[in-house]
Image (tube, rainbow, N blue to C red):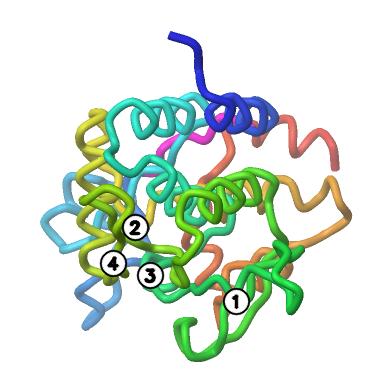
Amino acid sequence: MVQSNAVSSIQRWSETSEPVANLEYDLAEIVDRSRPKSAIELLSPERSRSRGIRKQAKMLSPEEIVRLFTHIERTSNAPVADRLKFALSLYAGLRAAEIAALTIADVTTASGKIATSIVVSAATAKNSCRREIPMHPVIRDALEAFRKRYPTADRLAITSRYGRNWIPQKTNALTQQMRRIYHAIGFTECSSHSGRRTFITVASRKTAEVGGSLRDVQVLAGHARLDTTQRYLEPSAHLSRLVHLI
């Protein structure tokens, strides 16, 4: 089967990204914070499970991203709308609640053209932290297709089950839909947060290429604290190469 232009576009961008490994546990997400943890408890997955460490959402490799969008193209009853939701998650690092709240005005200029950035307003963002995220080409392509398919839609997260009719999608429904799609592919450890974790880690690894720093990733993620951003990051498998570059 010949891939659609949308999937081909996503594959091009995925091929330029490093494969991202899967970090099974985030040691900072400890539910029981009533006492200090020993080194054994922090380093042992078996001990960690019994101590209430929350397992983080799986991150996606470039190959898995292509599989995801191919699955959407082949099985979704609203592939244009669903492609945009996952694009916003993977290529802008948006939370499900932020995607559900986005409007056309947040991604277009006053003249109605697609903007160069996505505006996450203080009313939409967590902790009322307004931010602007540069428009990724994959999102731009998804937006153009979305506006053509749903010219009257004023929200970006919609459900469309009856022909061209659509209704806004709430956060919980979007979260459940994303998990359901991931599980249908076999990505059972993925959730609506997987795209955000992938975005933040890939961005952190590429900051040096543009002369940036982890502070830039913090701004893109909308985190009030840098240590929150650090908890999202996946350790690299190339630490030895990194040390030799110093």
Query: What is the magenta range?
Result: 18-23
Between disc 1 and disc 3, whose residue precedes?
3
Q: CA distance from mark 4 to mark 1?
A: 17 Å
Q: Quadrant of residue 193?
A: bottom left
Q: Mark 2 belongs to which amino acid?
A: Ala
Q: Could you say which disc has been placed on residue 39 in the image?
A: 2
Q: Name the residue beneath numbered marker 3.
A: 100
Between disc 2 and disc 3, whose residue precedes?
2
Is the N terminus in the top left, top right, bottom left or bottom right quadrant?
Answer: top left
- SS assignment for the magenta stretch, majority: loop
Give how far across and how far down residue 125 sits, in percent: 49, 81
Toward the viewer: 105 or 55?
A: 105
Q: CA distance from mark 1 to mark 3?
A: 14 Å
Give how far across and how far down residue 102 sits, in percent: 48, 73
Q: As displayed, is residue 235 above or below residue 94? A: above
Would you say residue 170 is visible in this rendering?
yes
Q: As displayed, is residue 56 above or below residue 118? A: above
Toward the viewer: 113 or 225?
A: 113
Q: Mark 3 belongs to which amino acid?
A: Ala
Say few, some or many: other residues with alpha carbon within 10 Å of mark 3 (under 14 / 14 to 19 / 20 or more).
Answer: many
Toward the viewer: 224 or 176?
A: 176
Q: CA distance from mark 4 to mark 3?
A: 12 Å
Q: Could you say which disc has been placed on residue 167 in the image?
A: 4
Q: Name the residue beneath numbered marker 1.
A: 105
